[in-house]
Amino acid sequence: MVQSGDFQFNNGDGGESVYGGTFNDEDFSRRHTQGGILSMANKGRNSNGSQFFITLRRHAMLDGKHIAFGQVIAGMDVIRAIGQVPVDRDEKPRVAVTIVGSGEVGRATKSPANIHAQLEKHIGDLNEEIAPTGAKVPEAVKAKAILAGKQGGAAVESATPAGKAGGKEDEAEEDEEGTATAPARNERERRLMELRLKMNACRTSNSKEVVEEQKRAADPEYAMRQARAQKKREREEKEQKEEEEGGGAGQGKGVPRGKEYLLDTVETVEMKDAKKKKGNPDAFGWDVFNQDSLLRAHEKRLKHIQHDGKAYLEQKQEEEAKSSVFAGFGHKPTEEAKDRLQNAMEKVMEKKKEFSRRRAYCEEEDVTYINERNRHFNKKMQRYFGSYTEEIRQNLERGTAL
């Protein structure tokens, strides 16, 4: 049998399906009764991938184990010629075997310009020029010629009786005609090969697009991953281009990439910080409790309870004149100052209520507070010190405390 299809490792050990992984067995109704049966190669139950083989004769031992999914209907002599390729002890070909074309039977390629049909017609015209219709060349002879490295007219000349009998005459004519025919034949073969390569490229691109479309339909995040990978490739290409052109800012001064900020001066850093704070004051949501916001709130509260230094000095001088030199001085604020402090604290407490989340009230909990603020404070104490004072509280409740 002829085995192939390991496009993953190209050694017979791989060959996952084009959709990734393997797929399960389907139907074992068809039998391997003759040569030319296409069957899946697997490593056991439900382990089908991309590898397959083509039988060269009947193989009853494959029935019920491998899925027969097709049959060679034309070109079996080419398959048998491939089976004659010498192999090593690992059943690997000793010479390179190249697939020059592939496709699907009965499926038209979707193309706005119908490029495949045009290329097929052009290739047929070139084949007619290289191998005329009257020259009937067996498929086996063509396969052997391909294995021997002969193409086009060389295969025809080696197969036709006229080519075999008139070999010496042709050589004499070629000597007389010089090299006028050979360049024309080589040019036609070159054009034929270019067209075949174009067709293979079209088939490959179509297959890739089909696989990509199936992946996008199966995985919603596939397109996002592809976009991120594309951006990463573009960024790497841009960085590589900058390095080749002499590097970006700081590269010529021995500074690693991404650490160009080490070259900034103090004034530049301060300007950047000021601009950042001005554009983003960080006063939204929970960010109101950052260091800058707390400092601004403290300075705002101090405006309502500013210290009267003049009144303080006058009161100090009066107290020093009345009391002993070694006696201490205790400042006594005025009633107006006390009222300002009280009003400021009340405003702070009212402001804090706006940030307090309303919590569920449990009627069965012990009453250990005298008002709402005291209840909140007791909860804080319990949260931070409850685990350390639990035994002491239990002893006090039982009356067994020391």
Image: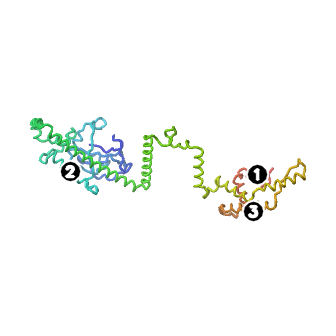
Three-letter amino acid code at disc 1? Ile
- Alpha-carbon neighbours of circle 1 within 10 Å: few (<14), some, or many (≥20)? few
Instruction: Assign the N terminus to one quadrant of the image.
Output: top left
Residue 266 as seen in the image, left or right of residue 25:
right
Q: Which residue is mark 1?
A: 392
Mark sitting on residue 245: none
The mark lying in front, picked from 2 and 1, is 2
Local crowd at mark 3 within 10 Å, few (<14), some, or many (≥20)? some
Q: Residue at x 86, y 52 (%)?
A: 317
Q: How far separated are the C-alphas under marks 2 and 3?
A: 97 Å
Q: Disc 2 or 3, which lies upstream in sequence?
A: 2
Question: Where 351 falls versus 165 (above or below)?
Answer: below
Q: Which mark is residue 122?
A: 2
Residues 117 and 242: in front is: 242
The x, y position of residue 325, in whole percent, is 89, 48
| Amino acid found under the numbered disc labelled 2 | His
Question: Alpha carbon of mark 2 to alpha carbon of mark 1: how far?
Answer: 100 Å
Mark positioned earlier in the residue sequence (3 or 1): 3
Q: Secondary structure at mark 2?
A: helix
Residue 334, percent across and down? 82, 59
Tell me the quarter of the picture where residue 143 sits: top left
At mark 1, the secondary structure is: helix
Q: Determine whether the residue tagged by mark 3 lies in a helix, strand or loop.
A: helix
Check if mark 2's residue and mark 3's residue have beta carbons within 8 Å. Answer: no
Dot 2, crowdedness within 10 Å: few (<14), some or many (≥20)?
some
Q: Are marks 3 and 1 in contact (CB under 8 Å)?
A: no
Q: Which mark is residue 343?
A: 3
Q: Is 283 or 71 nearer to us in this picture? A: 283
